[in-house]
Image (cartoon, rainbow, N blue to C red):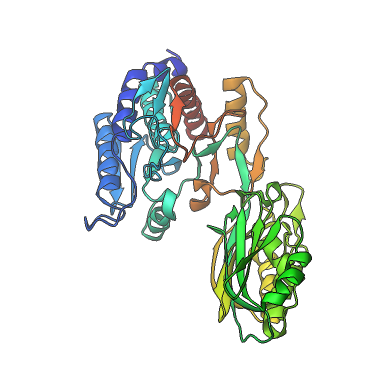
Amino acid sequence: MELKDLVEGQREALLATLRESIRIPSVREEDGSGFPYGANIQKCLEFMLETGKHLGFTVGNLDNQAGWCEYGAGEEMVAVLGHLDVVPAGEGWSGDPFSGDIRDGKVFGRGSMDDKGPTVAALYALKALKESGLPLRRRIRILMGTNEETGSADMKYYLANGGEKPVMGFTPDGEYPLINGEKGIVNVTFSHRLHQSGPVRLKKIFGGTAPNVVPASAAAELECPGEMLGQISAALPEKTVCVPISGGARIEAQGVGAHGSTPEQGENAIGRLLLALNDLPLEGELKETIRFLAEKIGMETGGESLGIALQDEVSGRLTFNLGTIEGDETGLTCCVNYRYPVTKTLADCDPKFQAELEAGGFQVEKQTHKASLYISPESELVTKLLRVYREETGLPAVPKSIGGGTYAKTMPNVVAFGPVFPGDEVREHKPDEFIEVDRLMKNAQIIARAMYELAK
């Protein structure tokens, strides 16, 4: 019997397991349970490991941070990396977000697409491969994480505490045909103290919700003499307004929201506000601070004025987003999110950015960094997976680089491969998340074939 027929034979069991896993609301909680990420995530991990044991696999659990189901023999291991934690359900669902209901050929529920559906598909794909009796020279491990949605501390723990690294692997937590490049991601929080002077003074400034979101609105409250309101209002550009308030004015700026990985698709309201403030009759330290932010960042999306406008042929240009700002009469704090090309490193951009901030009188409060990921399209891993995709779907198989990040960044020798097909709606983290049953089974077929090609 062909491998794809053996996969199809797992359909009912696969769906039953997926539905049961969705019914466990595995959202991270600080619940005092003693488990790393809460009792519900632990329950889901135990359920999956018990299912794997029932299917005849060897199972392992590293301190409840990550578990695995494994089949085969050999010194080397191939991994399929999935995760069992999910984001909160949120509002806007037409039914129970943790029902696992099947309607109109779709499995609904938080995690159905991201990432329980693909992880369960991998488990039953491995069961089909086991039943096939096809010869393998590497072990295959379905590695199940528990903290992808809130920091990926699970895989850091796994690697730091003796978890075996795969020689090759993939995570079905991205897109097809295959993602072989992911930009480096840097978040920087920096601040400036203020000693204000002059008739116009900053009382409050705010905008943005997160560093990786282009802010759609921002505002600043100014203390100023009433006779200056007309002058201030006349100086404002489009999409900014002056609203009189007690003792001064509030300057409001409107933008267009977008994801921080594609800031050029939005209009940064904080940048627009800073440009407007820079045209006002400010004085002293406030004037110099606003001038720096307006001239060095403003509404730019590529870091040009900061001197970090990097680019490469593989992934394009560096993207830059001023995500949040907050402050009062004593100082202000900003947070930016920038993403450098996949063939570059932090050393290519960070020293220059830090020097610019220092020259502007700013102090870095916090910085986080996820290094870029790039695996050559000529590598054995990429060429084999692309061949599998092409032969299983009949579709073009060209790898891509992205500005976002996937679970592949947490594990060496891993790329993102599926589960979203080209042209399909991206439904992760949205209300009424679902995965079509036919798409789920197609993923299982592709995963089974991919595991075999990497391990044979």
Screen quadrant of the N terminus: top left
Q: Is residue 372 left or right of residue 409?
A: right
How far across and how far down the image is residue 440, in percent? 45, 25
Q: Is residue 395 or residue 422 the one in the foreground? A: 422
User: To which quarter of the image does residue 425 belong?
Assistant: top right
Residue reaching furthest front?
227
As drawn, 110 above or below 350 = above
- Residue drawn where x is 44% and y is 36% of the image: 431
Q: Is residue 373 or residue 103 the one in the foreground? A: 103
- Residue drawn where x is 58% and y is 27% of the image: 389
How far across and how far down the image is residue 450, in percent? 51, 30
How many numbered circles does the render carry?
0
As drawn, 235 above or below 332 = above
Residue reaching furthest left?
33
| Residue 339 in sight in this render | no
How far across and how far down the image is residue 217, in percent? 61, 56
